[in-house]
């Protein structure tokens, strides 16, 4: 029986089954007129700057080196029979969270797929378990289940907001083994696809070519979705057509090759049953798509009319199918109990029901907003120009557990966080003060002290409206202090420039401390003088009193 179940382990087993399907990938050779525009295909662990064209799909894969700062290149012991993308991987033995940063087109829907083949690369023969995050939000747990099916993948359809032009895919170590990844694939989707996706994301649970017997993807599916097959439906049989099913490049309907085959019950009066097991204690919502197209040219005295029921109750009114044209029925459903959806023929239908393809997604509400894009661009530029690596990956502000070292951020609910302070004190910074620093327009505190910064003190600092504290001491800055900054200092800016020996108005930090001491000493002396004069006055008054009395 086909029993897709939604407790976590079985859910993963389904992913495995999907991965298994990769093994049996149809050898579809790339067509001449392939259009991979916008595809980002990353083979993790591939040598820096190298790339190749995958022989089964014609997709061009590139090395992951420029998308990630950390991790180690590794090679699985077992990968024979698998695609080339699985021949290398990147593992992350260091750090709790490691992230890929990938530039994408803003305001675009993306299909994001992460693929994994362990293959005993570490010689430990122990399958790790870890988490996958998209930016600050939890995406999925990657569980590799022992058995013959070595490959697993996670897939997400995600809308990248117009105010953002990158994504972070992060691997998080949860203490159950070292995270690793074999490949990352990003496919832009036309705006018109998956219209149900609004401010949420869709995690793939199941995408099947019911009635098919091999897996399809790009170039037959222009969107490069993986259509896997049912291996074990002993109660279903297949119907096929050689004719093409009308499809449109700009819709999310399955490609013709998937729609050309359909499943139908072996029992001609039976139904096609889809059983879904409840996810324990969650409000989890699923999005279902059932795709139908008539594949038989029916004589006039025949008709195929079918309806959908849920646990025996009518769920969707009877509907007819169009010959060689796709009809999609979709709905959202929260599984509060184990549920069977059945596709059955109506009484007056002369032939049994069919189903050509189905998709099931988990609706994910990613509630944590990522940091303001300008701030991210600026801080990323600062990080790369000054070659800072440690503990600065993924989103700089969120989640709070992984905030970048030296950064602090504002956090207003429902607003993108802003960077409000930057402390790169004693970070070995060399060269001039970068212009990108002035793109951190909400900055309040900046500490660049004790580095080797050269060049002049930029006037631009005075244009940061919120700046309250600026510490540039112990550097090699030259020239004079810009007028604007002196002006700001008069209005309360705390500015420290001591120990910059080439600055025209140079002050030594030690001397400054000395000054403070002098003030302190002067204060003390002053205090003592006051005390003494008070005592003197009191004594004098006392004396006068005594004189008056006497
Ligand atoms: C296939 O179905 C049979 C019985 O229906 C079951 O025993 C077997 O475990 C299934 N195999 C897989 C791979 O699901
Ligand atoms: C990769 O290419 C870049 C730019 O062409 C170059 O700077 C870098 O050294 C190359 N890396 C390797 C490992 O060849
Ligand atoms: C995409 O669709 C949304 C509505 O769903 C619309 O607001 C937006 O302008 C569209 N973007 C493009 C590039 O067509
Ligand atoms: C076929 O399905 C009908 C209705 O579900 C059922 O009554 C009948 O027993 C089934 N026949 C077989 C051979 O399973
Ligand atoms: C439909 O008509 C054909 C002849 O045109 C006949 O052979 C067949 O039995 C009919 N089928 C039904 C279900 O009436
Ligand atoms: C749902 O299915 C699971 C596994 O088959 C079973 O353990 C559980 O009791 C079922 N729940 C209900 C409410 O029937
Ligand atoms: C078949 O039955 C359905 C209701 O089950 C009805 O809506 C439809 O009109 C009927 N079609 C014919 C050709 O009788
Ligand atoms: C998504 O949009 C709906 C209404 O369009 C709104 O109620 C909901 O709060 C939004 N969710 C998030 C996470 O922004
Ligand atoms: C800083 O802002 C300017 C103007 O808005 C922009 O041209 C520049 O690319 C930004 N720099 C970085 C590193 O974001
Ligand atoms: C910056 O960090 C250093 C320690 O790394 C600390 O001594 C200094 O006070 C910090 N600066 C600010 C402004 O908090
Ligand atoms: C600055 O650079 C010099 C050599 O170029 C080095 O000796 C010194 O330690 C550096 N200072 C800091 C604070 O990094």
Image (cartoon, grey):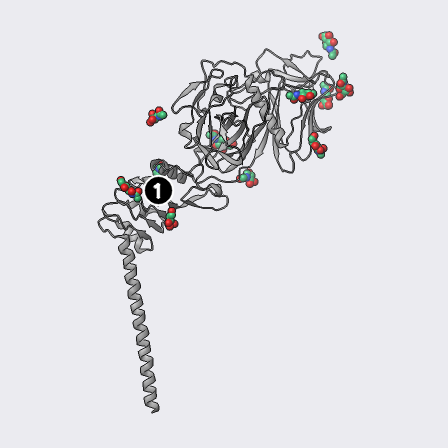
Residue 340 place in picture, x, y as percent = 69, 28
Q: Secondary structure at mark 1?
A: loop
Q: Identify which residue is drawn at 30% across, 51% down.
A: 496
Nearer to the camera, 141 or 160: 141
Can you identify the residue that label 1 sits on?
427
Q: Identify which residue is drawn at 43% across, 44% down.
A: 418
Quadrant into which the C terminus falls: bottom left
**In this view of the protein, can residue 443 be seen by the observer?**
no
Nearer to the camera, 58 or 86: 86
Residue 456 place in picture, x, y as percent = 25, 44
Nearer to the camera, 276 or 150: 150
Residue lying at the far bottom of the rendered structure? 550
Looking at the image, residue 83 lies above or below residue 468: above
Looking at the image, residue 180 lies above or below residue 346: below
Residue 21 place in picture, x, y as percent = 57, 20
Residue 105 place in picture, x, y as percent = 44, 30
The answer to whether residue 374 is left or right of residue 517 is right
Question: Based on the displayed image, in which of its 4 quarters is residue 201 positioned?
Answer: top right
Question: Based on the displayed image, in which of its 4 quarters is residue 522 positioned?
Answer: bottom left
**Mark 1: few/some/many CA within 10 Å (<14, 14-19, 20+):** some
Nearer to the camera, 163 or 129: 129
Quadrant into which the N terminus falls: top right
Q: Identify which residue is drawn at 50% across, 43% down.
A: 414
**In this view of the protein, can residue 516 be seen by the observer?**
yes
Question: Based on the displayed image, in which of its 4 quarters is residue 306 positioned?
Answer: top right
């Amino acid at each position: 029986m086909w029993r897709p179940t939604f407790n976590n382990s079985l859910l993963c087993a389904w992913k495995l089954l999907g991965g298994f399907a990769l093994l049996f990938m149809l050898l579809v050779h790339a067509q001449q007129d392939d259009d991979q525009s916008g595809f980002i295909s990353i083979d993790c662990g591939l040598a820096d700057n190298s790339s190749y064209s995958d022989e089964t799909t014609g997709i061009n894969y590139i090395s992951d080196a420029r998308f990630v700062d950390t991790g180690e290149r590794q090679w699985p012991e077992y990968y024979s029979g698998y695609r080339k993308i699985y021949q290398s991987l990147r593992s992350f033995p260091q750090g709790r969270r490691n992230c890929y940063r990938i530039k994408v087109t803003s305001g675009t829907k993306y299909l994001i797929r992460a693929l994994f083949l362990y293959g005993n690369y570490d010689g430990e023969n122990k399958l790790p378990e870890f988490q996958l995050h998209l930016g600050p939000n939890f995406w999925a747990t990657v569980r590799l289940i022992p058995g013959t099916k070595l490959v697993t993948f996670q897939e997400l359809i995600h809308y990248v907001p117009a105010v953002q032009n990158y994504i972070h895919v992060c691997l998080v170590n949860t203490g159950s083994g070292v995270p690793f990844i074999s490949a990352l694939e990003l496919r832009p989707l036309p705006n018109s696809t998956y219209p149900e996706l609004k401010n949420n994301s869709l995690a793939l649970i199941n995408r099947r070519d019911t009635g098919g017997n091999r897996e399809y993807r790009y170039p037959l599916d222009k969107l490069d979705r993986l259509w896997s097959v049912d291996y074990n439906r002993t109660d279903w049989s297949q119907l096929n057509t050689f004719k093409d099913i009308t499809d449109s490049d700009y819709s999310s309907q399955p490609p013709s090759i998937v729609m050309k085959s359909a499943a139908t019950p072996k029992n001609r009066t039976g139904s096609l049953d889809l059983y879904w097991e409840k996810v324990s204690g969650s409000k989890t919502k699923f999005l279902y798509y059932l795709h139908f197209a008539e594949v038989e040219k029916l004589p006039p005295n025949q008709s195929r009319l079918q309806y959908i029921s849920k646990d025996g109750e009518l769920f969707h009114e009877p509907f007819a199918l169009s010959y060689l044209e796709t009809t999609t029925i979709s709905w959202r459903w929260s599984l509060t109990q184990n549920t069977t959806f059945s596709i059955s023929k109506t009484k007056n239908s002369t032939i049994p029901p069919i189903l050509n393809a189905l998709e099931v997604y988990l609706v994910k509400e990613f509630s944590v907003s990522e940091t303001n894009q300008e701030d991210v661009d600026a801080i990323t530029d600062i990080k790369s120009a000054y070659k800072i690596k440690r503990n600065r990956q993924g989103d700089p502000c969120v989640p709070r557990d992984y905030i970048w070292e030296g950064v602090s951020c504002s956090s207003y609910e429902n607003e993108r966080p802003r960077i409000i302070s930057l402390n790169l004190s004693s970070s070995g910074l060399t060269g001039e003060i970068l212009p990108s620093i002035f793109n951190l327009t909400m900055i309040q505190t900046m500490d660049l002290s004790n580095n080797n910064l050269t060049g002049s003190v930029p006037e631009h600092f005075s244009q940061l409206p919120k700046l309250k504290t600026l510490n540039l001491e112990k550097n090699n800055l030259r020239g004079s202090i810009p007028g604007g900054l002196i002006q700001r200092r008069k209005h309360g800016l705390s500015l420290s420039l001591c120990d910059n020996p080439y600055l025209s108005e140079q002050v030594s930090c030690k001397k400054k401390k000395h000054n403070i001491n002098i003030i302190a000493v002067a204060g003390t002396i002053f205090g003592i003088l006051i005390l003494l004069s008070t005592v003197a006055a009191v004594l004098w008054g006392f004396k006068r009193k005594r004189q008056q009395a006497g």
